[in-house]
Image (cartoon, helix red, strand yellow):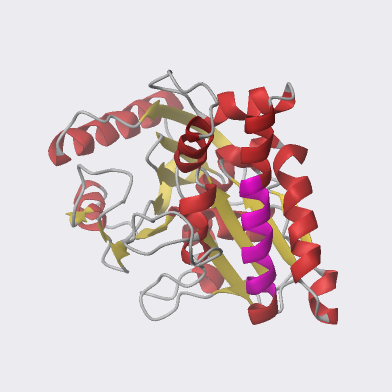
Amino acid sequence: MSPVFALAVDIGGTKLAAALVEPGGRIAHYDRMQTPVDLDAEGLWRSLEALLDKLLAEAGGGDLAGVGVGCGGPMRWPSAEVSPLNIPAWRDFPLRERLRARHPGLPVRVHNDAICMAVGEHWRGAGRGRDNVLGMVVSTGVGGGLILGGHLIDGASGNAGHIGHVVVDPEGPPCKCGGRGCLEAVARGPGLVAWAQEQGWRPDRAEVTGVELADDARRGHPVATAAMRRAGRALGVAIASATHLCDLEVVSVGGGLSQAGPLLFDPLEEAFRAHARMDFAREVRVVPAALGQTAGLIGAAALVFAADRYWSAD
């Protein structure tokens, strides 16, 4: 009997990743590539198709139960015309329509990449067994997804849980959304790097990354350390607000910047405890994503295999 997989895809400003995922959530086959930055819309689509073709060829067989995708937003949901802020080549790109044409007869379900991360953490990660979970991605951008009562909350337009645009500092830096002082503007990796360079950290380097910033913070560089504390405090403030609003049990934080560990989580916890003052909020656990960088792919697979909890649009 042939194995059955969900074809899971994770589309972000940094990488394109794809996997064949088993019904229990185990990744059987995986591949990824850096997101091309110099291609137009069709060139980027062809790059994604090539990645999927390579993955399926290397797997050497198996039946597909469906296609689940997490993609950076915003998007028109559930039709998934996508306009990822960090992928300028795609504006109103008909991603779900293209994938349906490529995989006729299969369910194709596309949601925000941060929502898929939250779903993955609830289904098979740090939020497993809990009914009220906020999942967050802190990377090129900051996003989130919200599970309440054991089910994904979509909201009116599919954007519920988008904690990246909670305002943490009304006088803070401008955000790509047009606002000011959003969590994403303060804590996203590229924004944090820019702030650190303005403060004198590697000011003459044109291309430096959040990974390098975290590495220097580990070595005790004062500006790099201050940058990580700045991000952690902003995250803690936003999470405290979300906890009071939604009565959460677990907040799972993933994405590239979360790999900084205590450099980020210690100031996060400090700020969270300072602001989460209601008795019910003090019981919340804020933890690193248990599934690491694969959370979004596993969540995308859950849109196929656990649609009763995570997909309401069909």
Q: Which residues are magenta?
A: 230-243
Q: Residue at x 39, y 27 (%)?
A: 33
Against 243, residue 9 (above or below) is: above
Residue 150 falls left or right of residue 115? right
Name the chief secondary structure element in magenta: helix
Quarter of the figure with the C terminus: bottom left
Q: Residue at x 21, y 39 (%)?
A: 45
Front residue (pair 214, 74): 214
Residue 137, position in %: x, y? 55, 51
Counting labels gives 0
Residue 250, position in %: x, y? 74, 64
Residue 296 falls left or right of residue 214? left
Front residue (pair 185, 96): 185
**Which picture quadrant has residue 10?**
top left
Against 104, residue 244 (above or below) is: below
Against 213, residue 153 (above or below) is: below
Q: Residue at x 41, y 44 (%)?
A: 9
**Which picture quadrant has residue 280?**
bottom right
Asked if residue 132 can be seen in this view, the reply is: no
Residue, far top: 204
Residue 267, position in %: x, y? 75, 49
Against 32, residue 228 (above or below) is: below
Asked if residue 228 can be seen in this view, the reply is: yes
Is residue 239 one of those drawn in magenta? Answer: yes
Residue 145 falls left or right of residue 13? right
Residue 264, position in %: x, y? 70, 43
Front residue (pair 8, 33): 33
Is residue 289 one of those drawn in magenta? Answer: no
**Which picture quadrant has residue 260?**
top right
